[in-house]
Structures are given as structure tokens and as C-alpha cells.
Image (cartoon, helix red, strand yellow):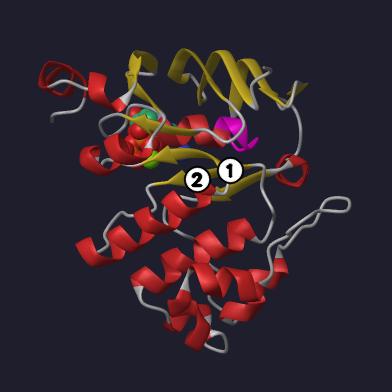
């Protein structure tokens, strides 16, 4: 089966500073792949490379067989990649409803496309905040909104960059539950997060970056204390 996303020897960086040193891995349709690694190892840079937001990129980044490199970010989004960015970045001067609909996308005649109502069923906290401005939301509400907004683009691949950062354990669990539901519905997800136990439970496969290279890849059960010590423990 052809992978949904295929990264082959991806290099990227900022000016003269190279951050990614040849990263290769795939995400298949319906699969949840967790991308892990200590601070500064290049996870967000990899996300930026996929979305056409890195200053420079080399290597191959294929989405449904087509090269993403060189394409504008809005075209990449339209092709079916939805991003929940690091730091959420909800529109502060728009309401929750406007945030959800402003960047919504439906491609072709899509079965079961996301609607505001379906987002609220998945993320009920947003339901009684639909008229609230983005800048009045709590951190947890902003995070839910960032997820809802990405879903409204009907992504074939959903990418979340540290979606649980700074949230309470209860809110984190709500996001894990939401992602597990999406997974059961067949949503492909590239998930960046530092919570090892949750990643082990959720992810079909785990990829760990270290200094811009893949240091380890495998399934959750393979993530032994030794591997954790070597690749994730600060
Ligand atoms: N805009 C930028 N300009 C220059 N260097 C940058 C820029 N953004 C990130 N870097 C550097 O690139 C390296 C990788 O950063 P990146 O944000 O990709 O790491 P990360 O794995 O996402 O880390 P974290 O877990 O802290 O989010 C770091 O050394 C960082 O300092
Ligand atoms: Mg990051």
C-alpha cells in the first residue's frame, strides 16, 4: 500500500543552521504515528518542512504520491494536511464559530465532512463558547479550538504539534480521548507530544528524533527504559 505521507532524506534548517539531517519515515492511511524527541531535536522544523513553512528543505516529502516541496502552504492544506500548530495560534479577534469556519475546507463531494455541530459533539466545551472571542478562551479551550479548526479543513492527515502542552491532566486526557475517537474513525494522525505513556497507548508506531535524525522507531511495547533513557530523558 502506498503511504499517505512519505519523507525521504529530509534535510531542513534556518539559514546556515541545519536542523534536520536526513529524516525518513512514512505515515499510512488511518495510522497514528507519534513523533517524539527532546527539546530542540527538530520536531517542529519537520512539521514546518511538511507545511512549506521552513526556510529551506531538501529531500523528498510525498503526500499521496505528490511532492510537497516547493508548494505554497495553502495548497498543502488544501491537498489534505491539517495542522494544529505549536502554540495553538487561534484568531484572537474572531469568535469560536468564526475560527472554526474561517479556514474550513471541503474537497470535492466529501462523505461525512466536518461541521461545527460535529466538532462540538467531539469537543463539547466549545459548544457553549461559540460566540466567545478567541482571546477570551482558556488555554484548554484554545487548544480544543485549534483541533476543531484543523478538523474543519477535513484533513486526510492531521498533524498536532504539542497539543497538550501546558494543559492540566484532565484536559490532556480529553485530548487523548478525542484523538482515540478520531483514530477509530480512521483518521491518519502525525502526533508530536512528550507524554510517553499516552503516546505508547495511542500510537500505532513511534519515531524518535535526535539531533535531526531518526534515533529510534518501533511500536509502543518496544519503547524500553533503555531506549527512553537514551533518546528522551533529559
Ligand atoms: N526560527 C528559527 N531560527 C533559527 N533557529 C531555529 C528557529 N526555530 C528553531 N530553531 C532551532 O532549530 C532547532 C530545532 O528546533 P525545533 O523547534 O524544530 O525543535 P523541537 O523538536 O520542535 O523542540 P521542542 O520540543 O522544544 O518544541 C533548535 O536548535 C532551535 O533552536
Ligand atoms: Mg517543537
Instruction: Point out which mark residue 213 bears.
Output: none
Residue behind mark 1: 186
x then y, percent, for residue 55:
59, 31
Res. 179 visible in picture = yes
Residue positioned 49% across, 88% down in the render: 128
Residue lying at the far front in this picture: please name it.
184
Quarter of the image containing the N terminus?
top right
Pointers 2 and 1 in contact (C-beta within 8 Å): yes
Q: Residues within 10 Å of mark 2 (few under 14, many from 20)?
A: some
Quadrant of residue 27 within the rendered picture: top right
The answer to whether residue 41 is above or below residue 97 is above
Residue stretch in magenta: 49-54
Residue positioned 39% across, 31% down in the render: 35
Q: Is residue 230 left or right of residue 146?
A: left
x then y, percent, for residue 84:
51, 52
Q: Is residue 52 magenta?
A: yes
Residue behind mark 2: 183
Q: Residues within 10 Å of mark 1 (few under 14, many from 20)?
A: some
- In what quadrant does ligand 1 lie? top left
x then y, percent, for residue 177:
37, 57
Callout 2: helix, strand or loop? helix
Residue positioned 32% across, 18% down in the render: 211
Residue positioned 16% across, 17% down in the render: 230
x then y, percent, for residue 19:
42, 22
The answer to whether residue 184 is above or below residue 190 is below
Callout 1: helix, strand or loop? loop
Q: Is residue 100 left or right of residue 85?
A: right
Quadrant of residue 66 within the rendered picture: top right
Quadrant of residue 72 within the rendered picture: top right
Amino acid at each position: 500500500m502506498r503511504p499517505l505521507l512519505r519523507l525521504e532524506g529530509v534535510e531542513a534548517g534556518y539559514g546556515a543552521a541545519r536542523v534536520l539531517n536526513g529524516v525518513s519515515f512514512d505515515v499510512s492511511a488511518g495510522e497514528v504515528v507519534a513523533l517524539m524527541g527532546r527539546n530542540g531535536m527538530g520536531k517542529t522544523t519537520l512539521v514546518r518542512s511538511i507545511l512549506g513553512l521552513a526556510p529551506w528543505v531538501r529531500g523528498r516529502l510525498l503526500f499521496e504520491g505528490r511532492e510537497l516541496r516547493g508548494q505554497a502552504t495553502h495548497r498543502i492544506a488544501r491537498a489534505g494536511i491539517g495542522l494544529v500548530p505549536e502554540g495553538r495560534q487561534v484568531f484572537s479577534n474572531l469568535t469560536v464559530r468564526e475560527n472554526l469556519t474561517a479556514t474550513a475546507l471541503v474537497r470535492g463531494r466529501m462523505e461525512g465532512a466536518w461541521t461545527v455541530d460535529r466538532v462540538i459533539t467531539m469537543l463539547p466545551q466549545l459548544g457553549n463558547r461559540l460566540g466567545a472571542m478567541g482571546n477570551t478562551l482558556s488555554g484548554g479551550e484554545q487548544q480544543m479550538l485549534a483541533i476543531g479548526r484543523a478538523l474543519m479543513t477535513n484533513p486526510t492527515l492531521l498533524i498536532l504539534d504539542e497539543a497538550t502542552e501546558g494543559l492540566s491532566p484532565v484536559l490532556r486526557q480529553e485530548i487523548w480521548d478525542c484523538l482515540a475517537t478520531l483514530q477509530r474513525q480512521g483518521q491518519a494522525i502525525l502526533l508530536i507530544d512528550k507524554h510517553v505513556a499516552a503516546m505508547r497507548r495511542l500510537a500505532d508506531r513511534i519515531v524518535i528524533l535526535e539531533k535531526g535524525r531518526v534515533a529510534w522507531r518501533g511500536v509502543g511495547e518496544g519503547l524500553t527504559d533503555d531506549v527512553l533513557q537514551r533518546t528522551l530523558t533529559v
